[in-house]
């Protein structure tokens, strides 16, 4: 991935391994995308369409590493109402639970994937739950995002343009908690542990909530200019003191230390256009990947983030895609693979 390497190593197996990039072309523009984490489903991803119409599509694709082809399984492709704003496979590495995929758009939906060749049940995807957080109406404010709690997989938290965050118990199909989280639209939500989550909003703030004390939240950061929405949030799973957020239409990524609210610990400023996606490394507490409208995916080493770096921090790796990168996911079960989506293409890159 754009790494400069020792020329004496050229041609070695290691060098060839490092240049692995696999591409899949979808029949439509890709927006939502996610890695499966199940041990028995390596190199499997879900991708979803961004079509300006009611019927959209979700496909489940898998890399066949014997021939390097990413293939879609037509039995596991299904229609979806509106473009999903996010898709996440159940965080169940050890395959103890049913194989589920959740998506957010007008509602939160949980889909069951029957991905076996058993004669009794053909391979298919079926809707398991449709979860509406608005008790007073069959309509609800569109969901901007959601996050599936890895420590407690029965819990999913959603964020909505109606200023709320809703915590679901998907096993009981009931709302655990719904709270007004911000003054304006909530654009993203991330879990930081069993009962703790954070959200970002059009009101320009990052807020942290603890389900044991629902009346209060802690403002970790507010954007310096008024009316500057924060659109994405990534919480560092390896070191929960750190989170990162993106400002709408901004080329910088703000990294925060929750012990020192209001002041960014570092700002990453090497993108040439708006940043669209961030992903912390699943296996290292000090690496993060960012991607944006400059068609670049950048990996940063933040191990020195406490000390000021003259001229600002530079990324350690850079990859240039064929168009603006809208989506980025780092595989938690295979941490040397990052997936990006741009235009109609899905690419998986060995990092």
Image: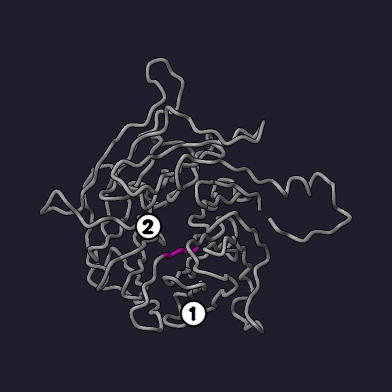
Q: Give the residues drawn in magenta, as a range.
A: 232-236
**Residue 100: image location, x then y, percent:** 38, 38
Q: Is residue 124 above or below residue 245?
A: above
Give the residue at mark 1: 264
SS of the residue under disc 1: loop
Q: Is residue 295 magenta?
A: no
SS of the residue under disc 2: loop
Instruction: Specify whether 16 is left or right of 140.
Output: right
Q: Is residue 177 above or below residue 69?
A: below
Instruction: Specify whether 38 is left or right of 191.
Output: right
The residue closer to the viewer here, 213 or 110, is 110
How crowded is the residue under tag 2: few (<14 C-alpha within 10 Å), some, or many (20+)? some
**Residue 284: image location, x then y, percent:** 60, 60
Q: Residue at x 62, y 83 (%)?
A: 308
Circle nearer the N terminus (2, 1): 2
Q: Is residue 49 above or below residue 181?
A: above
Give the residue at mark 2: 194
Q: Nearer the viewer, mark 2 or mark 1?
A: 1
Q: Residue at x 53, y 46 (%)?
A: 345
């Amino acid at each position: 991935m754009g790494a400069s390497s020792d020329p004496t190593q050229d041609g070695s197996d290691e060098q060839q391994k490092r240049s692995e990039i696999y591409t899949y072309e979808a029949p439509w523009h890709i927006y939502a995308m996610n890695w499966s984490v199940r041990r028995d489903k390596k190199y499997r991803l879900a991708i979803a369409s961004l079509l300006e119409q009611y019927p959209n599509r979700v496909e489940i694709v898998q890399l066949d590493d014997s021939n390097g082809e990413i293939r879609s399984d037509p039995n596991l492709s299904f229609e979806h109402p509106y473009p999903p704003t996010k898709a996440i496979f159940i965080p169940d590495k050890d395959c103890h639970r049913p194989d589920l995929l959740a998506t957010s758009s007008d509602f939160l939906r949980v889909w069951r994937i029957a991905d076996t060749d058993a004669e009794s049940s053909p391979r298919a995807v079926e809707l398991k739950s449709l979860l509406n957080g608005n008790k007073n109406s069959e309509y609800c404010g569109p969901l901007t995002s959601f996050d599936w709690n890895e420590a407690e997989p029965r819990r999913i938290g959603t964020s909505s343009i109606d200023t709320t965050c809703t915590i679901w118990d998907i096993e009981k199909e009931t709302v655990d908690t719904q709270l007004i989280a911000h003054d304006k639209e909530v654009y993203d939500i991330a879990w930081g542990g069993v009962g703790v989550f954070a959200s970002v909003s059009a009101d320009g703030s990052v807020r942290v909530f603890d389900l044991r004390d629902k009346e209060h939240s802690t403002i970790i950061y507010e954007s310096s200019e008024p009316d500057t929405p924060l659109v994405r949030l990534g919480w560092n799973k390896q070191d929960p003191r750190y989170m990162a957020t993106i400002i709408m239409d901004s080329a910088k990524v703000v990294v925060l230390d929750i012990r020192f609210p209001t002041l960014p610990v570092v700002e990453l400023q090497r993108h040439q256009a708006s940043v669209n996606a961030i992903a912390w490394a699943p296996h290292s507490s000090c690496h993060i990947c960012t991607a944006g409208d400059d068609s670049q995916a950048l990996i940063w080493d933040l191990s020195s983030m406490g000390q000021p770096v003259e001229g600002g921090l530079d990324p350690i790796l850079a990859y240039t895609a064929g168009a603006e990168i809208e989506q980025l996911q780092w595989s938690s079960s295979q941490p040397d693979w990052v997936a990006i989506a741009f235009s109609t293409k899905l690419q998986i890159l060995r990092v």
